[in-house]
Amino acid sequence: MNSSAEAATAIGAPRLGRRIALLQNRVLGVAAFLVLLVVFFSLLDPRFASLANADTIALNGSVLVIVACGEAIVVLTRNYDLSVGSIVALASYVGLDVVRLHPGIGPSLALVPVLIGGACGMVNGALVAYANVPSVIATLGTMSIFRGLAYLYAGGNQINVKDLPPWVVDIASSHLFGLSGLVVTAFLVVVLIGLGLRYLRTGRQIYAIGSNPAAVPFYGLRGPGIIFRAYVLTGLLTGLAAFLFGVRAGYIVPYLAQGLELTALAAVVVGGVSVLGGSGNVVGAAIGALALATINNGLILLGASDFTRQFIEGAAIVVAVIVDAIIQARLRELLRTLRRRRAS
Amino acid sequence: MGEPPAPNPRLLLEGISKSFDGIRALEDVGFAVQPGSIHALLGENGAGKSTLVKIITGIQPADAGNIILDGEACRFPSPMEARAQGVVAVYQDPKLFPHLDVAENIFMGIQPTSPLGLVDRRRMYRRARELLRTLDVDIDPTTLVAGLSPGEVQFVEFTRAMTEGMARLLILDEPTAALTPLETERLFGVVRRLQARGTSIIFISHRLEELSGLVDTVTVLRDGRHVATLPAAGLDEAAVVRMMVGRAAGATSGRRRQRGAERLRVERLALAGVFEEISFAVHAGEILGVGGLVGAGRTEIAQTIFGVTPPTGGKLFVNGREIRVRTAHQMLSLGIAYLPEDRDGEGLIPPLSVLRNLELPSLRRLAHAGIMQSAAEHRFASATVADLQIRSASVDLPAAALSGGNRQKVVLGKWLGIHPSILILDEPTHGIDVGAKAQVHEIIEHLAGDGLAILMISSDLPELLRLSDRILVVADGRVGGLFDRADATQEAILTAASTRRRSRAA
């Protein structure tokens, strides 16, 4: 007989409940993974464990944290958004070009890339929620469409951040309580989205539709509306990330943020958001993003090539999904034991 | 229709009719449900019970007829409006969110909020606790729904029905199919408490027996028509079955088959965490029925034998030879075919034509040097269609265009094309109409007569008793009993189905 099944039958109910809760909430596991990474790279390279390097990781990680939060929202609804990299390119190029052409208006123009991101999100949302296009296909299409639009708009040009009004660079290099404005922004995004998912009805509905889409109409909820809102929110967050990404890049070109969708998805999955929807949270996704930024930084310090980093990022996704599958199977087994016990 | 409605029925249905693609599902159905009554709605699969519920709760509109609730005509555009008027249905397959906890499920979409529009979680859990207590249900609102027993899941649905005050009408669609007797008892207790508070309850079932002592009125539907609405007192099962079936029931075929050599034997077969210690044998020309509660592990056993989920323990013999089960492909080549319960999802490819579906497992045989031979394909398909009396205008029609019974025959024909020696049927007549059901029964008996070994899972007790030579009962992932046709009764099977594991490590 299988020993784990017997073990599951043998443990007491409160412990069973605790184990289930532990497997459900994966934030602790992801955080432990991050700590392990830090220890690992510190041992390999003394330069890693410096304050300056921590700052670099935080800065590089911040943009990814914001995009990963957005991606997590869509993944919670049991969908994907593969267009976030292209949204970053389109929103930052067009948005910052508008800023360049209207230097007199001031910081309120920072909203332009955010709104462009939101518009892209509406397109994705409309395709997935109302035209019933499977999300992978729909956003694979818009990934090309948004990227193509960015190239068309740019027409071979690029934007130098130095040509933008000074407030742009001021925002990007601002500090609050000794922390970079970028880091503070990412932190606020995680807190606000995290609270919103927990305390807004829409937030709970996002979890509900990912958990069991078929049940949603029986609750009088409009499933397409929930999915549409999720995509728009993802678009807005990606637009915000686009502004920060562009400013930090220095030069804004249409091939900006190529492959970011995969990194964002990796962060979400590493962060314990189930690819099957309904479980996980943005705190996990954010820590997942930091873990990927840490790996990236560590590999650069160790002198790994671009290709190696790409390889490792791909492997991270695959391993994370396998770990997720193992945890889900274990969880199902424990839940089955619990159900049986409750029936008798 | 017929009997005059009482002065103020809770629900009055008049002349409800509904067709799907020209096929009558309901025709001129009318009856009344009194306030505070527990009303049984009985009928065979396909009699129109579920369609009627969908019409009452606004999931589907009726083609004609009136729904009158406490004297007021109403036609709900969606279940939400029905719920707002206190009309709630609880379905056989629960519509809950497994990743979320009990309180979240109870209040999804109607969460109490603070003035800022934020979900007031503390109030939500407090209210959930109160509601569960009014129903005298002992569930912690922070429990994950995925960890609830089938009965508890239904209680969560009931509780949800109570969030906006007492429901006026609660409809339960075959709620006991997956419940142990203990849970059924708890369910009846909760139903009685609701009744005491003035809720009318419609209890859908295909057996009156299980509802004896609970219901006060019985309505029987047959083939989409209203047969009768009668007081439950004095009604016996036989009379109800006669009304449901339209003929005397219990006519076993009586035809005795010759039991041949052993085809399939399993010894202490186990799948970790799902079932264990399963031992039985099936012989050529024999129908071994497999009974038990929904969720007892019967489908899992069948799928393990078929190689979909290879076993983690025990032995399996085909024609006396021990086999290490690895894949379904391997088991097929050994002559085992499996007809899944979900025939549209797993049994056939609905948009493909009848011919394309039929030939799928036999492609190699119908090809010459790898190229399909159109003449052979058509010969094969036409022969199968004729053999099984599949009613389809042409073999080129998509399988989706056929009725449930005919789709099931296509699935059968598909597997018969490879000439299996062991056939595993999972709920072969679930959800198909009465006429087609009799035909499927005839085909199954005919196949056994031709020497096939048949393993038939069924939750339909009369079907199990009518067709099986022996009946294996599975309870909680173990063998609960094995009966010869002569000793098998509904009571014996039900009792065996509800045995629990005696010793469980504390």
Image (cartoon, coloured by chain):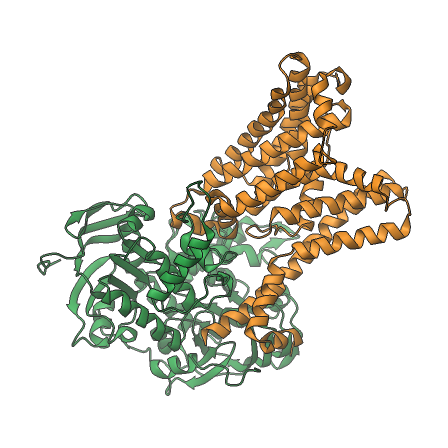
Residue furthest front in the image: A177
Q: Is residue A125 above or below residue A218?
A: above
Q: In this view, does A207 lie above or below B178?
A: above
Using the rendered image of the protein, determine whether residue B96 is visible from the camera's viewpoint: no
Q: Looking at the rendering, which quadrant does residue B473 occupy?
A: bottom left
Q: Which of B246 and A104 is in front in this view?
A: A104
Question: Which chain has been coloured green in this picture?
Answer: B
- What count of labels does the image hold? 0
User: Residue at horizontal 59%, vertical 38%?
Assistant: A137
Q: In this view, does A36 lie to the left or right of B151?
A: right
Position in image of residue A113 (x %, y %): 62, 25
The answer, for residue B340, to whether it is visible in the render is yes
Chain A tint as drawn: orange
Which residue shows up at 66% across the image and 68% down it? B326
Q: Which of A132 and B153 is in front in this view?
A: B153
In the displayed structure image, the side of residue B112 where residue B210 appears, left or right? left
- Residue at image position (23%, 62%) is B221
The quarter of the picture where residue B406 lies is bottom left
**B495 lies left or right of A120:** left
Q: Nearer the viewer, residue A201 or A227?
A: A201
Q: Where is residue A174 in the image (x, y as percent from the top left)?
A: 72, 28
Quadrant containing the C terminus of chain A in the rendered view: bottom left
On the image, the x and y values in percent for residue B334 come to: 61, 70
Q: What residue is at 48 percent from the left and 41 percent from the top?
A: A226
Quadrant of the frame with the N terminus of chain A: bottom right
Classify B61 as above or below B234. Answer: above
Residue B39 percent across, percent down from the top left: 22, 65
**Considering depth in this image, is B134 or B171 the residue closer to the camera?**
B134
